[in-house]
Every structure is written in C-alpha cells, then in structure tokens.
Amino acid sequence: MREREVGLVSLWRNLMRRGGRTVPAQEPAPSVDAEAAGRTPGMRVASLERTLDDHVQRLGAQDPRSIAARNNLASKYAQIGRREAARAEFERTLEEAVKVFGEEHPQTDVIRENLAWICSDSARPAQAAELWEVLLRHRTERLGPMASDTVDARTRLADALRRSGEHEAAVAHYERAIEDSADPVERERLRVGLSLALSAAGRYPESIRQLRLVLAQRSRRLGPRHYDTLVIHHRLGRAYTQAGMDREAIDALLEAYRNGLAAVGDPEIRMLTFKMRRDLAGAYSAAGRHREAASLF
C-alpha cells in the first residue's frame, strides 16, 4: 500500500483544484495510514525513513518501490514544514525517476510537480519555473494546450517567473493562459497575476486595465461589497497611485472605502477598510489635499 502513495500528492491537488479550493503548496496528500492510526508526525516520519532505508538496502535506490518510498518521505517532510529536507528528497527522487521511468513518464512528472510545489513554497521561484516549464511542455504534448492541467502548469510557470523577476516572460504566459482557460473565475485570477507582472515591468496603464476588467466582473458576480471585490477595488486604487494618477486614485479608493464601511460587520472587511482609509489619506496628501488627508489619519 505504501508504494501506492506515490502520485497521491498531485491527485489530491487536482481534486482540490477541481472542487474550487485553494491548495497550499506545502501540504501533500494525507496518507492512508497516517496520524489517524494514532501516531504522531514524528513517529510517522521515523516509520517512512525506516521504510526507505529498508527498500534501498534490499532493492537498491532505483527500484520503483524505493522511489515511491522516497517520494512519500519527502511529502511527509513537506507536510510537517521541513521544506529543505523535503526539497532535497524530492530532488533525489526526481533524479532516480528520470533514470528508471524516463524524462517524460507520467510518474516522473508527478514527482517533478511535487518538487515544483516545494520550490515555490521554499522561496525558490527560479527553480520552480524551470520545473513548471518542463511540465508545461509535457502536458502540452500529452493533453493539448487548452486542457485544464496544461493551463494550470502555464499559470504556475507564470507565477514563478513573476516572482523570480522575469516579468515580460510572465506577462506572455499569463496572456496565453487567459486565452486557453475555459473557467471565467480562473481567468479573473490570471488577470490579477497579469496586472502584477505588468506593473512590475512598468507597464502601468495595461496593469490598470486588467484590474478594471476584474473589478467589473467581480462586481457583477459577487457584488461591490464582497471581500474579493473590495480587495481588487483597493488594489486598483493603489495601482493608480503607483502610476501617479492622483485623481483616479482618490476616486477609486474613496468608492472602495465607502463600500467597505457599508460591510464592516465582516472582520476581514473591517481590516481591509483600515488599509483603504490609510491609502486614501496618502492619495489625498499626494494630490495636495492635506486637510482631507488629515481628517482620515
């Protein structure tokens, strides 16, 4: 049964994604016989370490059962927050999987995805980008460019490129992912990422345009006082400020602030409204409207 755990991380992630839930990068799939059996995380790690050592000694490091055992141990390390240990084990697992299964084998790509996630979670975006680029190529060849898993790989690649400072490359992948995605809600998220990449590249008008599109879509879908809408409205106001468009920044932040005040019963919105108030005061100050700024400080 333990050998079958290999691949559960990606399977679990796919099921979570398709159910509309956000998947933390550091959490692998729960094991069939994990803490539910009464064992602590440390005991489970020790058991997986013993299993790996036993497999390597009896079967060799390149036996598929040893590869599965190493992947399971790396996944457990990731689950309990030992990210560097997890990354090292996933890297070793990937090396062995390439030798045994081949560079493009689906099992190899499962392990490559695990490593990509832990690299993203360990502040190694450039390494994650390299892995997602390979996964994107394989999924494009295997599934086609518009398959949901292919679009997801392109999205993760764009995110990693943006975080590693490759802003123009990130823009290109975000734009292609928007074209290929069939999910309107996912396209909203992609436009937010695209706006961040455009802003980082100094392309402020294009960044603002993306945020305006998302704001219009969320206002229709969720309403203007929904937390997710207000987050974008606030971000739009800050984008105007960054672009030096003081009047537009004041208008956007003032409207967002008023909508936030109307929904401050929600604790998250209350905290967001405090940030809007601060940024609105800053926008007033930047425009030379110091009396109105002072009334908000």
Image (tube, grey):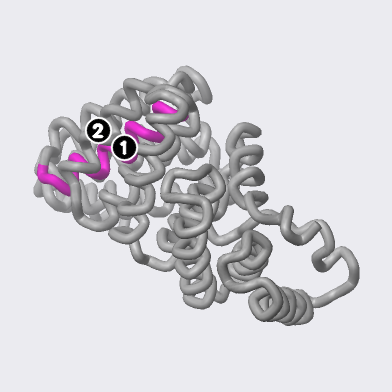
Does residue 6 appear to the left or right of 249 in the view shown? right
SS state under label 1:
helix
**Mark count:** 2
Residue 131 drawn above or below residue 212:
below
Question: Can residue 128 be found in the magenta stretch?
Answer: no
Q: Residue 80, can we see it?
A: no
Give the residue drawn at x 76%, y 75%: 44
Identity of the amino acid at label 2? Answer: Asp
Quadrant for the C terminus in the image: bottom left
Does residue 274 appear to the left or right of 32 in the view shown? left
Q: Residue 197, can we see it?
A: yes
Marking on residue 251: 2
Give the residue drawn at x 26%, y 49%: 162
Q: Which residue is mark 1?
A: 254
Percent from the top left, x then y, of residue 291?
19, 51
Residue range of the region highlighted in magenta in the rendering: 186-202
Residue 1 drawn above or below residue 134:
below
Q: CB atoms at circles 2 and 1 under 8 Å apart?
A: yes
Does residue 284 appear to the left or right of 123 in the view shown? left
In the image, 282 versus 47, the foreground residue is 47
